[in-house]
Amino acid sequence: MTADHVALVTGGGGGIGTATSLALAGAGATVLVSGRDELRLQASVEAVRAAGGVAHPLCLDVCDVASIRDARQTALDLVGPVDWVVANAGVAISAALTSDEAESVARQQMDVNYHGTRRVFEAFLPHMLKQGQGRVVMVASSAALMGYPYITGYAASKHALLGYARSAALEMEGKGVGVGVVCPHYVDTPMTDASVARIADKTGRDHEQARAALAELNPGGKLVQADEVAGVILRLLQSDTSGAVVELTGSEQREIESGSPIASNTPKGD
Ligand SMILES: NC(=O)c1ccc[n+]([C@@H]2O[C@H](COP(=O)([O-])OP(=O)(O)OC[C@H]3O[C@@H](n4cnc5c(N)ncnc54)[C@H](OP(=O)(O)O)[C@@H]3O)[C@@H](O)[C@H]2O)c1
């Protein structure tokens, strides 16, 4: 029953994370809205509650193993074991290959986008395995499927994430835990607002022109909406398939890998 699901959404304080928290709560799940900024988390939680859903803020830094462990315990005490994980937290920082920041920017994005997702998944996995069921959706990017200039660090971290997710899905076969991936092109969120501001600053174009230029880069010719990403995430969480990879182009959803049926297992001890 959907009503019994307990969902963790990382990066829940804005953009895709807020939209996903709303969608999951709308489907009856109890949602733990997680991130580092308490005010932003509280705003997302209020939005879910105003829509009639159940949500709680949960402070968690995906770069800090102790904070993930503490959050897991807080979640367990508050609402019981998490069986839906949406690993959505991420950062996007552009830097030319020859810039002084290239080294630190590459490391930071690998730490948040790849290791951060991996840490959260691996922290919550034992409880899902113990229950013999769980679903995880990792938010990658079109930059997991192709390259873009000036975001080598971001693209590398998202390629790494997709390789990890594909392998995790295979390793979870027969264990009742499904792993899915969404790969949106540019989405209309604060992350894209920041890219628009950077482009406007560097090129002298106004914000509307910069936003239109990003939208034109999407195969669908327009920005993806956060609600659409949230809808695909919910569909993957509710499906009995693991290993699916869905690309969102701005005009369509392409299931570029369809995955395979999840066979559940008898719950095991730790
Ligand atoms: N926008 C796009 O065009 C686009 C396209 C494809 C994929 N994506 C991916 O979609 C995901 C969500 O991005 P968005 O577009 O919704 O942008 P966003 O509004 O900037 O959301 C990113 C979220 O990640 C969280 N975060 C960053 N570092 C964190 C950390 N160390 N620990 C915990 N949370 C952290 C932030 O929360 P706090 O700062 O409050 O902690 C923020 O809520 C990201 O993984 C992004 O790479 C975005």
Image: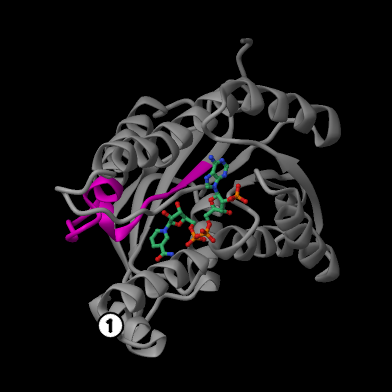
Residue 117 spot, x, y in % from top left: 46, 37
Part of the protein shown in magenta: 136-155
Residue situated in front as seen by the camera: 139 or 150? 150
Q: Quadrant of the C terminus?
A: top right
Residue 176 spot, x, y in % from top left: 51, 31
Residue 219 seen from this side? no
Residue at the top extreme, as displayed: 270
Q: Residue at x 41, y 34 (%)?
A: 111
Amino acid type at image mark 1: Ala
Residue 212 spot, x, y in % from top left: 33, 86
Element assignment for label 1: helix
Q: Which residue is drawn at 77% across and 47% down?
A: 57
Quarter occupied by residue 143: bottom left
Q: Is residue 130 left or right of residue 175?
A: right
Dot 1, how many residues are within 10 Å of its Cα: few (below 14), some (14-19), or many (20+)? some
Q: Residue at x 71, y 30 (%)?
A: 71
Residue situated in front as seen by the camera: 109 or 186? 109
Quarter occupied by residue 251: bottom left
Residue situated in front as seen by the camera: 147 or 262? 147
Residue 216 spot, x, y in % from top left: 26, 83
Is residue 138 shown in magenta? yes
Q: Is residue 218 left or right of residue 31?
A: left
